Image: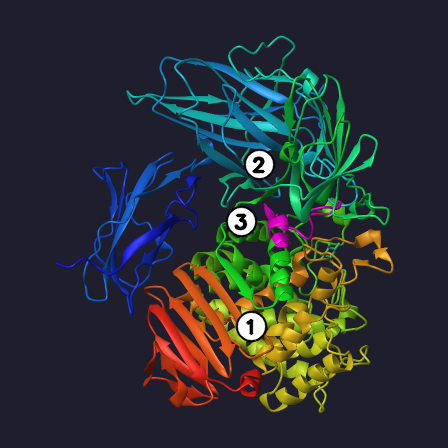
Amino acid sequence: MATAAITPADCRCEDRVDPLGIDAREPRLSWECAGSGRDLRQRAYHIQVAADAAFATPLWDSGRVESRASAHIRYAGAALASHQRAYWRVRLWDQDDRVSAWGATATFAIGVLDQAEWTAQWAGLTSGFQCSMAPRFRRRFRTAAAPVDARLYATARGTFTAMINGALVSDEQLAPGWTDYAQRLYYRCYDVTRLVTGGDNVLGATVSGGWYNGAIGWTGVNRHYGDRQQLLMMLRLEYADGRVETVATDDQWKLAHGPVQQTSLLYGEHYDATVDDPAWCTPRGTEVGWSPVQVQPLAAKPLLQAHPSEPIRRTQEVAPIAITARRPGVWLVDFGQNLAGRVRLTMRVPAGQVVRLRHAEILDPQGDVYVDNLRTAVSVDVYVAKGGGETFEPEFTFHGFRYAEVSGLPTAPAVADVRAIVLGSDTRRVGEVTTSDELVNQIYANTLWTQRANFIEIPTDCPQRDERMGWTGDAQAFIRTATCSMDVAAFFRKWLIDLADTQGADGAVANVAPQVEKVMGGTGAKGDAAWGDAATICPWTCWQVYGDRDVLERSYPMMRRWAEYLHTESRHHLRRADDRRYCCFGDWLSVDAYTSRDIIMSAFYAHSTLLVAKAAEVLGHADDQRRMRERHARIVAAFRRAFIRADGAVLADDQEEVSQTAQILALHFDLVDEGQRAAVFAKLVADIDRRGGKLSTGFVGLPYLLPVLSRHGRGDLCVRLLKNEEYPGWGYSIRNGATTVWERWNGWTKENGPGDPGMNSYSHYAYGACCEWLFTDLAGIDLIEPGFAVARVRPRVGLGLDRAAASYRSVRGLIRSAWSTKDGQVDLAVTIPPNVDAEIWVPCRDPASLREGGAAVPKAEMVDGWAKVRVGSGDYRFTAAFEAKRAVAG
Ligand code: BGC
């Protein structure tokens, strides 16, 4: 029998490749259908999961399952025990019922399912140890033979790096990351089989305060979650004869100061290599001068769970583009790119030499590092050399910077000796977009760099100043854009747990997640409009983009309780700012425009209520669905009565003039009566025109600005706004040297230099939310059904750009759209992966001109200046005559 036209590829478990130490009892399996050809579909699948790579010990055999589903298939085999290693593979039947070979074997390993299985105790600092240092913990142990399987489960109250016999157990950074440590702590699992030997071994870790007890936020408050660092490790050794031993943190562990004299995520690190003992974590290392740890038994709280997302890693090295002498002994290194991470410096200096690194995003007018906008986050790393040639890279801190000032070297550092090390949650790249316009391309590049600089364990506002918190408003504004470039499924699943952990008894989520009330001083506990609405917008976006029903199901209680909270805070179906018992950011950082808080609060009240209704529908909660729908209808009616004037202006009593954001929210959230839509939209366009083609939107309105313009036929205005090089606009920052997205449109100007240092980040992704439009509208790749089961490619052409191309690797495979125009002809190339159905919309003036691969397209349906074609998988090449004006209106 002929083999199938599709084969399984890119197998993932819980949205990750071969994850180790997961705690899902029924892990969800996903794959892509690979194959090239038209109309390829998966008709059925067959999954096998076994305890061995030869599949001799089956755990689950799904048998043939008639289904097109290829993502998030729940394991339904024998109960999985802790530590179980599993091997899995899948084969597929195609549309013609031909079966593929088995796909490549993928794996997962279960972690510690039951908290009671932790045989470890917390090993902590005793009172003689400074929390701001990063002390070392170690334990010597002996094995009779080398194990056949060794796995280390580790977490800390603090951040740690673990070693066995002098070798790092992994390349992860700042483990175990940031959660509300009072509620839950994530452990990581490492396969250390190759590191443990028969005979003497040493297991050790260095533990800094990190988010746990180091400074976070702007108040310098430390010890937010607790006092002294603690380490929890359990090394599970399995031998050839089946015997299992564990080495766990307990009172046998020893503690000593190491070379890290001072470290802080925000401020920097001071490392004294002269006091380092490189053998400290080997059997050769002495325990003279080491003291006993303080032990504490494990309690039921916090929960100990497997980390659900990608770890932080070094994701790139960036070489300097220039190194210049500033003063005798002081050099300025320019990496050419603003980023988050740290500097790695190789040097040859005498023992005891102090080398200092200062970091900055921009330079001051004299050409030196400008650090005022870092506020208290001084971002200085200090290294005391041991002599003889060495390399320094701090371990427990990171900075947001483009420039580093180096001092303490006898001669200028060579380019080969300095690197910027980019840090970030290691989410994989899934999308890119390019256009014929360099400025638009730079906006995208800046946005992607800003995403990478801020997706460090949680979505943060900024990576450089003393803030770096999980601001909910920024995250909800940017989430859809984030999904276009990186696979953030697991990343957001994790952060949505952080967000749910902030939810109070009244249903309010906080303005930042994880919650840091001591920093927020009582102002952050209750989420503001558009900030707290991350509780509904983010889970809904994950469901849409990834088709992940589980994330919706888990988030549903949070979504519903948030909507109920808004309801209890409402009056006559609207929310009013004067009722507020919490802070209200309004359209944060908007430009010369005021949008009534009543309008923002009520619009998001409507939107969140609608999203809960939709989620209830997906999940089958019929009562909730009905109740939320009815409530939504009442809110919309009240909104229209209260805020939408006969002439289309969306105004409240405290708002005298039309604002772009008010018009946009009313349109984007469908709060406008169909008959009034054109009038409301006209007011938006009039305001943009009045400002000479400029925007005025802040964080709240900006994400929807381009989609609203485009979907009402004014894609030309989107391109005009993107290409605008004057204040306020993206082009203005780029003309002024931006390589990341700025927090403020006027963060730096030729006339005045840096803006208000009190709040002026050069790496803030909220305004990068425009990039969603480049994918979904300009290149036109969007979803119709969740998880791109049904996709749409509907590019906007003829808007003043000659071409655009995007590729996006959805959970079901790679989708491409590339168009160019010439002499009134559009040329559109589209790739649809197997097992995906799609609508392709070709801008087309004259149906007779439409060709695909040179042939007529009889099945095309003409809709309002587009030729709409339904297709299955394949590579398509359309050409058509289009009318620029017509396409503008499309
Ligand atoms: C942050 C923002 C955040 C805002 C709340 C700022 O300090 O940097 O991005 O959303 O506060 O208004």
Residue 454 is marked as none
- The residue stretch that appears in magenta: 449-468
Label 3 belongs to which residue? Answer: 494
Residue 820 in view (yes/no): yes
Horizontal side of 503 relative to 332 (left or right) equals left
Q: CA distance from mark 3 to mark 2?
A: 17 Å
Determine whether 833 is above or below 357 in the image.
below
Report crowding for label 3: few under 14, some 14 to 19, many 20 or more residues within 10 A (C-alpha).
some
Q: Nearer the viewer, residue 858 or 106?
A: 858
Task: Locate residue 628: give its quadrant.
Answer: bottom right
| Mark 1 residue type | Leu
Report crowding for label 2: few under 14, some 14 to 19, many 20 or more residues within 10 A (C-alpha).
many
Label 2 belongs to which residue? Answer: 173
> How many numbered markers are drawn?
3
Q: Nearer the viewer, residue 111 or 884?
A: 884
Residue 669 in view (yes/no): no
Q: Which mark is in front, 3 or 1?
A: 3
| Mark 3 residue type | Lys
Q: Magenta stretch containing residue 453, yes or no?
A: yes
Residue 610 is marked as 1
Query: Where does the C terminus fall, quadrant-wise?
Result: bottom right
Q: Magenta stretch containing residue 110, yes or no?
A: no
Query: Where does the N terminus fall, quadrant-wise?
Result: bottom left
Q: Secondary structure at mark 1?
A: helix
Q: CA distance from mark 3 to mark 1?
A: 24 Å
| Mark 2 residue type | Gln
